[in-house]
Image (cartoon, rainbow, N blue to C red):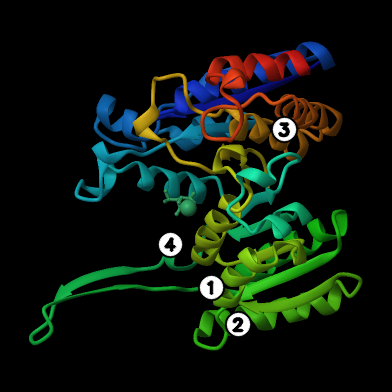
Amino acid sequence: MSEYKIALIRGDGIGPEIVNEAVKVMETAGDKFGHQFSFVDVLMGGCATDAVGVSYPAGTAETCKSCDAVLLGAVGGPKWGSDKPAEQRPETALLAIRKDLGLFTNLRPAAMRKGMADASPLKKETAEQGFDIMMVRELTGGIYFGKRNRYETEDRGIEASDLMTYSELEIERIGRKAFELARLRRNKVTSVDKANVLACSRLWREVMHRLAEEYSDVEYEDMLVDNCAMQIVRNPGQFDVVVTENMFGDILSDEASQVTGSIGLLPSASLGASAPGLYEPIHGSAPDIAGQNKANPIATILSVAMMFRYSFGLSAEAQAIEDAVDKVLADGWHTADIAGSDEQLVGTDKMGELICKAI
Ligand code: IPM
Ligand code: MG
């Protein structure tokens, strides 16, 4: 029997409810396949600000590092908005934990699941063709972590700046992840940049071209970010692995998730050079429906499947969770965010139970 220790960052809004269901699923899969899980609660986000005055309490990263993986529900909410000092804002904590755990690779799969075409905002013909994109977002560099400035000028009022920086090292290590993943999938990498304007993007492209030569068995293309944003709604089926820098990845991954039909279904994994990885749904904390048993727990449950696969190498277990989700959806069960008949509308906890039963 193998044992895994998981850090749980339940967070804000719907975070605690969806993490509960994911824990149930982990325990069910553990019983079935003979693994044991222990859990350590980690306080982070707006709830931490309320409890101890800062969103990222001292020791957060150390506790996470003592675990085999981290599962995060969601952090954030209007209560801790951009008018608050940085140390109280949940986003500060999110960026800090990414940096402190060295999670430079962010995997955001966006695939059209069976039976979801009706919920997609895409044209019917496009949606029915289906797509399966693995968005690989660089997560610890670029404009998110560059020097920021804000100062008074003599003649232009206040001025502010954010510096975008990328090194060859940062580009190469994320690029390698993308090519390695493509080899396990449909063998194609699209690298997205803005090389017609940005110096960082020109360096990005140079490094990617070197890698494309090294991984010559993988089909490779460059794409400008504006064009990519358009292609995702025009013909998402053309993409396999899409690799891009931090901010472009933030924007494109929201777009790619929405065209699948529900942002409530999409998991993500953030990985570094060594354990632990951090797994979270790609949606936010949805404060408007928090505590009402309405949230869709599937994205968090599928994040557990990613954890099993990428952190623990438990592919059969991961597959069992994914198959269970597909079965429950194919049987017509749904939470309020995805289309279906009223008779088969279920709450957060019932959705979790159905998935456990299907495992
Ligand atoms: C995400 C979020 C974060 C980001 C925010 C909350 C800081 O949008 O994970 O995509 O921009 O990375
Ligand atoms: Mg985002």
Pointer 3 local density, CA inside 10 Å: few below 14, some 14–19, many at least 20: many
Disc 2 under 8 Å from ligand 1? The reply is no
Q: Is residue 208 above or below residue 258?
A: below
The mark total stands at 4
**Residue type (three-letter) at the residue carrying disc 3:** Ala
Pointer 2 local density, CA inside 10 Å: few below 14, some 14–19, many at least 20: some
- Mark number displayed over residue 305: 3
CA distance for labels 1 and 3: 31 Å
**Residue type (three-letter) at the residue carrying disc 4:** Tyr
CA distance for labels 1 and 4: 11 Å
Say which label, 1 or 4, has the lower sequence index: 4
Q: Nearer the viewer, mark 1 or mark 4?
A: 4
The quarter of the displayed image where residue 296 is located: top right
The quarter of the displayed image where residue 53 is located: top left
Disc 4 under 8 Å from ligand 1? The reply is yes
**Residue type (three-letter) at the residue carrying disc 2:** Leu
Q: Secondary structure at mark 4?
A: helix
Pointer 1 local density, CA inside 10 Å: few below 14, some 14–19, many at least 20: some
The quarter of the displayed image where residue 175 is located: bottom right
Residue denoted by label 2: 203
CA distance for labels 1 and 2: 8 Å
Say which label, 2 or 3, has the lower sequence index: 2
**20 displayed left or right of 158:** right
Percent position of residue 125, x then y? 73, 58
Say which label, 1 or 2, has the lower sequence index: 1
Residue denoted by label 4: 144
